[in-house]
Amino acid sequence: MARFAPGDNVTVRRAFPPGHVRTPYYIRGKTGSIAHVLDSFANPEELAFGRDGLPKRPLYRVRFAQSRVWADYSGPAGDTIDVELYEHWLESEEIT
Amino acid sequence: MSDAGRMHHDMGGRDAGPVDQGGHSHPEWEKRVDALMMLLSNNKRRLIGVDELRRGIEELGAENYSKMTYYERWVSSITHNLLEKGIISSDELGRKMAEVEDAARAGGEKD
């Protein structure tokens, strides 16, 4: 069962574990909002080592403002980037 | 931006210069490596998954990762995965490589 719903604000965990991870470096620590709940999939971090990756983990398409991802972003203010991220990489972010 | 914790293969957002838009051809051996991976990963066999392939590429190290071509990385990872799983042995592989080299040398001499 997916913990987050479309519109929820989330922050990507700032973690740098060894092994095989599919969370890009540039998006760690950034805050965005859930655009889509995709489905649940076997965990690639486990599959990479020949294990079954179960239980399946919810995968989300998370939308970030480009200006919040890149310090020197010079494109239009409304530009966004979508990144697909597994639930265990996301934390709730309360809007203040 | 500090790059502490960034792994060498995690390149998103780094300056990479212009993108080469030109087409390129694949030598025969690259097509065979691609076919090999498709056969190893298909539903009938499921011997190597895409995440295992990628993990093996990431484990080649920074120097090899930047030096090797795309399919050289693939075939190195496929080899390591097959050795890890015991599907092939180093001895078997070493003998086959020598056999192929000998055949190529013999073929070359005829020309």
Image: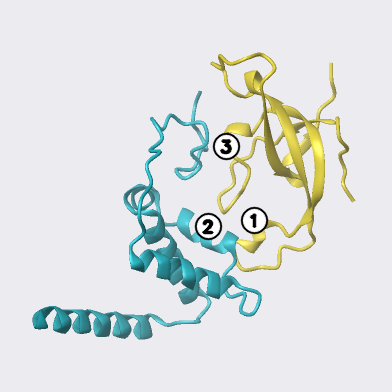
Name the disc covering residue A45, or none: 1
Q: Quadrant of residue B72?
A: bottom left
Q: Residues within 10 Å of mark 1 (few under 14, many from 20)?
A: some
Quick check: A16 left or right of B1?
right
The quadrant holding residue A44 is: bottom right
Residue kind at label 3, given as amino acid type: Tyr
Provide the chain ID for the residue under circle 1: A
Same chain shared by disc 2 and disc 1: no
| Quadrant the C terminus of chain A occupies | top right
Q: Secondary structure at mark 3?
A: helix
- In the rendered picture, chain A carries what hue? yellow
Indicate the secondary structure of the residue bearing disc 2: helix
Residue B2 lies left or right of residue B96; in this view the side is: right
CA separation in Å, label 3 and label 1: 15 Å
Q: What x and y, as percent, mark residue A40? A: 80, 54
- Cα–Cα span, label 2 and label 1: 11 Å
Looking at the rendered structure, the number of numbered marks drawn on it comes to: 3
Of the residues shown, which amino acid type is indicated by label 2? Arg
Which residue corresponds to mark 3? A25
Give residue B54's mark: 2
Which chain's residue wears label 3? Answer: A
Q: Residue at x 35, y 67 (%)?
A: B28
In percent of width and height, residue B102 lies at 19, 83
**Do callouts 2 and 1 mark residues in contact (Cβ within 8 Å)?**
no
Which mark is in front, 2 or 1? Answer: 2
Task: In this rendered view, identify the residue nearer to me: B108 or B83.
Answer: B108
Q: Of circles 2 and 3, which is in front? A: 2
Chain ID for cyan:
B
Does residue A26 sit above or below B90 in this rendering?
Answer: above
Q: Earlier in the sequence, mark 3 or mark 1?
A: 3
Image position of A76 with respect to B75: above or below: above
